[in-house]
Amino acid sequence: MGGKKNPIWRVVAADQRSPRDGRFIEVVGQYNAQTSPSTITIDEERVRDWLAKGAQPTDQVRKLLRTQGIAT
């Protein structure tokens, strides 16, 4: 997402069998490191729902969730 030299990353729920940049199930947030301070927008309710269903966040997403105060 974003434009040339202005990346914005999506935080998504995806099946582990899908390729990294492939299909995903749901967009649950986004991260923009270009702003000062970085902008993190996460739908906490949906993230907690996915974690309750057994979703495993990547290391980078885990860091973003901790920054937002969502324990994993």
Image (spheres, helix red, strand yellow):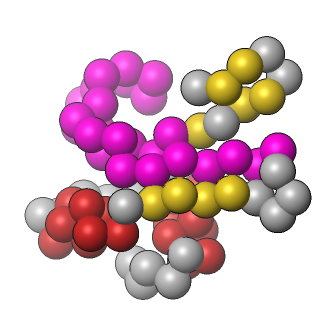
Camera-side residue of 22 and 30: 30
Image quadrant holding the N terminus, namely: top right
* 23 inside magenta stretch: yes
Residue at image x 44%, y 79%? 70
**Farthest-out residue, top:** 4
Q: Is residue 11 above or below residue 49?
A: above
Q: Is residue 72 left or right of residue 10?
A: left
- Magenta stretch: residue 55 in it? no
- Count numbered badges in the picture: 0
Q: Is 59 rendered above or below residue 34? A: below
> Which residue is at a point 58% across and 65% down the rendered structure image?
64
Look at the picture and state if 67 lies above or below 53. Answer: below
Q: Position of residue 67 (x, y in %)?
A: 61, 76
Q: Is residue 1 visible?
A: yes
Name the residue located 35 percent from the left edge and 69 percent from the top edge: 44
As drawn, which residue projects farthest toward the left?
53
Query: Percent from the top left, x then y, of residue 16?
Result: 27, 38
Q: Is residue 16 left or right of residue 57?
A: left
Query: Which quadrant is home to the C terminus?
Result: bottom left
Residue at the location (29% across, 31% down)?
24
Q: Is residue 26 left or right of residue 34?
A: left
The part of the image, by quadrant, that contains residue 27 is top left
Give the x, y percent position of residue 32.
69, 46
Is residue 16 in sight in this rendering?
A: no
Residue 33 falls left or right of residue 39? right
Point out residue 21 in the picture as x, y percentages from the top left corner: 46, 23
**What span is colored magenta in the figure?**
10-34
